Image (cartoon, helix red, strand yellow):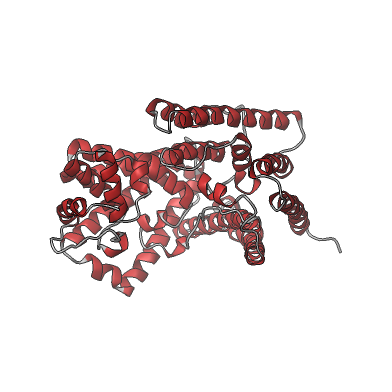
Amino acid sequence: MEASPLISSTLRELGWIAAYLAASLIILLSRQSYSRKQWLFAALNIAGVLVFFLSTSRQDIFSLIFLLAIIVAHWGLLRLFNASGNDSDRIYWIAFLFPVALLAAFKSQSTLHMLGISYLTFRMAQTVFELRDYSGPNIALGEYLAFLVFPPTFSAGPISPFPYYRDTANGAAVSRHNLGYGTLRVLVGYIKFRFLATMAQQLTFTNLWSDGFRHGYGDFIVSGGAYYVYLYMNFSGYTDIAIGVSAILGIRVKENFANPFLARNIRDFWQRWHISLTEFVRDVVFTPLSMTLLRWFGNRFSTVAIIVSAFATFAVLALWHGTEPGYFIFYGARATAFSVNVIAENGLRKRKLLRDYMANRWIALASRIITFLFISLTFAFFELQSWTEIKKAFALMT
Amino acid sequence: MAKPETIAKMLPVFHEVFDDDTLVIAPATSAKDVEGWDSLSHIRLMVAIESAFEVRIRASEAAKLNNVGELADLIERKLG
């Protein structure tokens, strides 16, 4: 009896992962200098990106060469920043905006596609952000290449800080414990990514609503909820694989999810879902914008400043995903819920009721259910995306 | 190690931001020790500290602070 295509492809991938791990461990555990190890690791990672994500077609080879050229150019900017003592505001902004501008250029056209460009540019921008207050040695080119084209995090993150990589990509944390932990994490990830996600996907709009029948209003939430579960299993499963593979190599990678289904409000949700991206936009958009508005208008208008910053940050996230109206409805609803939460908690805090509110377990249970339903509802628009699909879904509802 | 006078000058700022005149701070005091010290009130705290000490704190610096002592050290570095 032949194995199903799903199982065959999973076993094939696991085989390639095992081969990558074996080669990586040989390099990281060798007696080479750190610098030479990083050059070898960079070469292996470039080959890994070709094997796992690209092909040997001319287009993909050119894409990879272009990516490497971007990384080398950005490294040059980092060296200039280092030469200024990590102090020059002008060079900082050039180095920070270079990958952001590149991403915007790619997103604004539909001819060229480059897998991994979003996460690559965010990692580059984050490295500049981190370097400003970093006291470690300058980043070497081999090290930077190895970090940015590290296959586990190349295509979908997590957006892990450079210091995490530097502190652990030397083989020192390779251990039996990490081997066991990493292996278990990879297996859990595969179960979520390949099997549980596929099961949840059966009830999403794409599948359930193409059955030719009309659907009740309840099905809208069911499909939204199914998409929420599908996305979680798919994305967190992939993250588990990435973190697990990294852990086997003793390399630390930032966590990306923390039980989002337990979120009791939208603010809590954003601290549990796609954490590396949320913290990145919080640090480079939300916090600087909030602080600037507070400086201009004073603490008396702090709530307004926070709400304006929240809407701006969620608008950036919407644009990062694309220009479809579904993304703006999705993030607009989130920004509104975030603002309502801020105002409500401020009110409770002023009346000294916040502690009791947070401690009440029935309120906690109700909050979690309401938050889950709200997130499911908004994820419906994230899946539908275009006005055409949204109108089609509403037309099918009885 | 932060000077006691810096931390003493920070105290009224904490009282105002967290609306609690009974609050006591020490170098090891962190967000988990102060009710209401979350990411949003942290932003308000940073701007209030800037105003009280006439310094400018970057968002990247604000993000890396772990306790009152590190904030006091940062203030003293900026004051030179």
Can you name the residue that lies furthest to the right here? A1
User: A335 or A117: which is nearer to us?
Assistant: A117
Q: Quadrant of residue A135?
A: top left
Can you name the residue that lies furthest to the bottom here? A361
Q: Eyeballing the image, is A167 above or below B22?
A: above
Is A247 placed left or right of A358 in the picture? right
Q: Eyeballing the image, is A192 above or below A363?
A: above
Residue B16 in the image, given as x and y percentages of width and height: 15, 53
User: A144 or A306: which is nearer to us?
Assistant: A144
Q: Eyeballing the image, is A88 above or below A161?
A: above
Q: Quadrant of the N terminus of chain A?
A: bottom right
Q: Residue at x 37, y 58 (%)?
A: A268
Q: Residue at x 72, y 51 (%)?
A: A30
Residue A234 in the image, given as x and y percentages of width and height: 59, 55
Residue A9 in the image, given as x and y percentages of width and height: 76, 54
- Number of labels in the image equals 0
Can residue A108 be seen in the rendering of this structure? no
User: A192 or A271: which is nearer to us?
Assistant: A271
Residue A333 in the image, given as x and y percentages of width and height: 36, 48
Can residue A177 be seen in the rendering of this structure? yes
Is A64 placed left or right of A254 in the picture? right
Q: Residue at x 47, y 61 (%)?
A: A258
